[in-house]
Image (cartoon, rainbow, N blue to C red):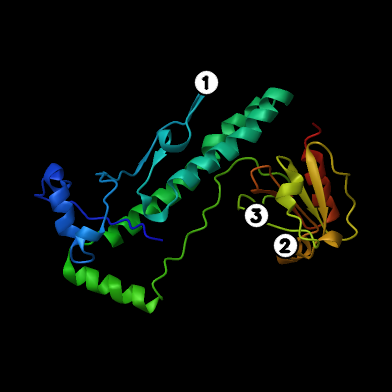
Amino acid sequence: DDRVRWEFKIMPGDDPEAIAAPDSVERMISPMVDPADVDVQRIAKYTFRSLVASSWHVGRVFLAGDAAHLQPPFMAQGMCSGIRDAANLSWKLVRALRAGETALLDTYEVERKPHAQAWIEEATRVSELCQMIDATSADERNELLRESGGRLVPILPSLGHGVHFGTPSEPVGELSDQLYFDDGRSLDDEAGQRYLLLLGTGADSPESTSAVFVASADSSAAVAGQLESQAAIALLVRPDRYFAGVARNSEELGLLLAELPTR
């Protein structure tokens, strides 16, 4: 609406305190707007860092979010990465505490660190594109952006090695789509914090339980399409909505079902 955020690079030789003074801010925004028409509500200086903690898990202590990884904000993935950390760790903590499966906790860092690292590297790359100060390089960048329609195509990193059941194959470790029943209900809303088992027509399956929600292709064209795209008769989705396993025949389905939690 009527709110605007401007960002300016603090150049070598600039005085960070002086450049953040109100008269300096007015001078910087004046080419774009009459400063008299602006109510400046916040002035802040940031130093962007790209950092990953060497260890995220020691004993009973876990790091998540900015404590585990820092990235420039150019891809808006800082808080998103922290939410993914919490989603990854929370269901594993539940199974460790309720079912004694403490080995699951060792998969938190090895799954999440490569994913966070990929986004940090991408955000750093984009920050370098945004902050170019060489005029020739900036002109070349601008031309490339014009040719691409001005869009940056986001990366889709997979999890690192971890909790992957059955036959390890694509799309294991990748984020699942948001799927819906034919009547408009969201599978995420119906499944809640449970495993989600997507089953093709005619596949033998268990009933939905407190640990697993079963969705059939018969009740959802979206589920049928997801299975068809993987040439699968079943897909197992974890509580954090990453694919845990794929079954393309009855034998692989048996492997998946054997790994389902009972509580």
Whole-Å distance between the Cαs marked 2 and 3?
A: 9 Å
For the residue marked with disc 3, what is the amino acid?
A: Ser
Local secondary structure at mark 2: helix
Q: For mark 3, what is the residue?
A: 176
Q: Nearer the viewer, mark 1 or mark 3?
A: 3
Instruction: Verify CB contact (< 8 Å) between mark 2 and mark 3.
Output: yes
Whole-Å distance between the Cαs marked 1 and 3?
A: 31 Å
Whole-Å distance between the Cαs marked 2 and 1?
A: 39 Å
Q: For mark 1, what is the residue?
A: 59
> In the picture shown, does residue 108 fall above or below 152?
above
Q: For mark 2, what is the residue?
A: 226
Residue projecting furthest to the left: 13
**Could you tell me if residue 11 is visible in this image?**
no
Local secondary structure at mark 1: loop
Residue projecting furthest to the top: 59
Q: Residue at x 22, y 55 (%)?
A: 8
Which is more N-terminal, label 3 or label 2? 3
Determine whether, in the image, residue 241 is placed left or right of residue 77. Answer: right
